[in-house]
Image (cartoon, grey):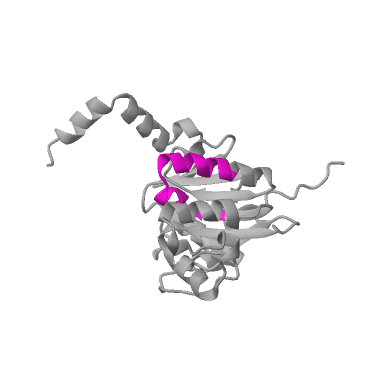
């Protein structure tokens, strides 16, 4: 008899059968939200990709709140709110979780990380971030401090566009840090636009679009195809873009 596997800590997400909501209201009218049922996660790394407005960050935020994180991000002990813009999607989600709870957890959202850093300063919780204020570092350095010192492993980590403050070289370093977390029994769910991060081996990639959600291979993502095409033919692509009629 095979033993039960602890990972994935979060196995799948769906909308509760008894949930009541208006499909004409945000975010329920988004095709990706309507296709969310039985979204099954990889034990190691799952990526959400898609155009701005496709719903990937909205779904990630809803999952995070349903798990007990603040909409602003941070650990589950971080409790503050600077804006009343939380989607109600979390209230209708049904999460299928492992029998084993992760020992660590964090929700990173790039757009509100500044607010989390301010909260850390105010509360004095700096030891796990290297003992130094996140505001005393560049945005990219603060993100890397989070990945390298705050996230301890054996955890469930939700990252919303972690590449936002990272140079290409730092994105490679982040890829290495993600692998170290996976090696230490962690599961990560990441919304990203980065073709570098998306290259993580064997990850599950969900494409969010006007057609809903579909699992795709790395080489079939727009991020990979556009980046490869531009780098291989950048002179021609620049000429096409810059000479194009604005009309």
Q: Which residues are magenta?
A: 158-178
Give how far across and how far down residue 213 sits, in percent: 48, 46
Q: Nearer the viewer, residue 236 or 78?
A: 78
Residue 215 x, y percent position in the rendering: 52, 40
Residue 92 spot, x, y in % from top left: 55, 66
Location of residue 158 with respect to 90 vertically, above or below: above
Task: Kindly identify the residue that appears in the image at 57 percent across and 59 percent down.
Answer: 130
**Quadrant placement of the N terminus:** top right
Please name the residue shown 42% across and 74% down the image.
82
Q: Is residue 117 left or right of residue 238?
A: right
Number of numbered discs: 0
Q: Left or right? Give the position of 75 relative to 246.
A: right
Residue 225 belongs to the span the image colors magenta: no
Q: Is residue 33 visible?
A: no
Q: Residue at x 69, y 52 (%)?
A: 154
Give the image location of residue 217, x and y in percent. 51, 33
Camera-side residue of 89 and 98: 98
Q: For residue 171: magenta?
A: yes
Secondary structure character of the magenta stretch overall: helix
Is residue 143 visible from the viewing direction of this image? yes
Instruction: Answer left or right for 233 relative to 96.
Output: left
Q: Please state, as top left, top right, bottom left or bottom right, where the C terminus lies in the image.
A: top left
Q: Is residue 241 left or right of residue 189?
A: left
Query: Residue 107's image quarter?
Result: bottom right
For the point 40% across and 44% down, the residue is: 167
Residue toward you, 15 or 114:
114
Furthest-right residue in view? 1
Q: Is residue 215 above or below residue 68?
A: above
């Amino acid at each position: 008899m095979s033993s039960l596997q602890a990972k994935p800590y979060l196995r799948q997400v769906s909308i509760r059968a008894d949930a009541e909501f208006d499909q004409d209201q945000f975010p329920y009218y988004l095709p990706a939200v309507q296709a969310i049922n039985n979204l099954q996660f990889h034990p190691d790394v799952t990526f959400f990709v898609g155009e701005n407005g496709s719903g990937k960050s909205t779904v990630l935020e809803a999952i995070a709140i349903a798990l007990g994180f603040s909409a602003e991000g941070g650990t589950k002990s971080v409790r503050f709110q600077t804006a009343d813009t939380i989607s109600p999607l979390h209230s209708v989600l049904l999460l299928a979780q492992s029998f084993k709870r992760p020992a660590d957890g964090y929700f990173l959202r790039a757009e509100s990380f500044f607010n989390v850093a301010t909260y850390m300063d105010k509360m004095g919780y700096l030891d796990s971030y290297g003992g130094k204020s996140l505001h005393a570092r560049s945005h990219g350095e603060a993100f890397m401090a989070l990945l390298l010192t705050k996230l301890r492993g054996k955890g469930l980590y939700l990252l919303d566009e972690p590449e936002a403050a990272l140079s290409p070289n730092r994105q490679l370093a982040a890829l290495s840090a993600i692998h170290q977390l996976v090696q230490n029994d962690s599961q990560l769910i990441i919304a990203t636009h980065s073709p570098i991060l998306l290259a993580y081996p064997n990850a599950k990639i969900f494409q969010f679009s006007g057609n809903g959600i579909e699992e795709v291979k790395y080489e079939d993502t727009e991020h990979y195809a556009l980046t490869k095409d531009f780098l291989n033919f950048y002179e021609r692509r620049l000429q096409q873009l810059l000479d194009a009629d604005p009309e």
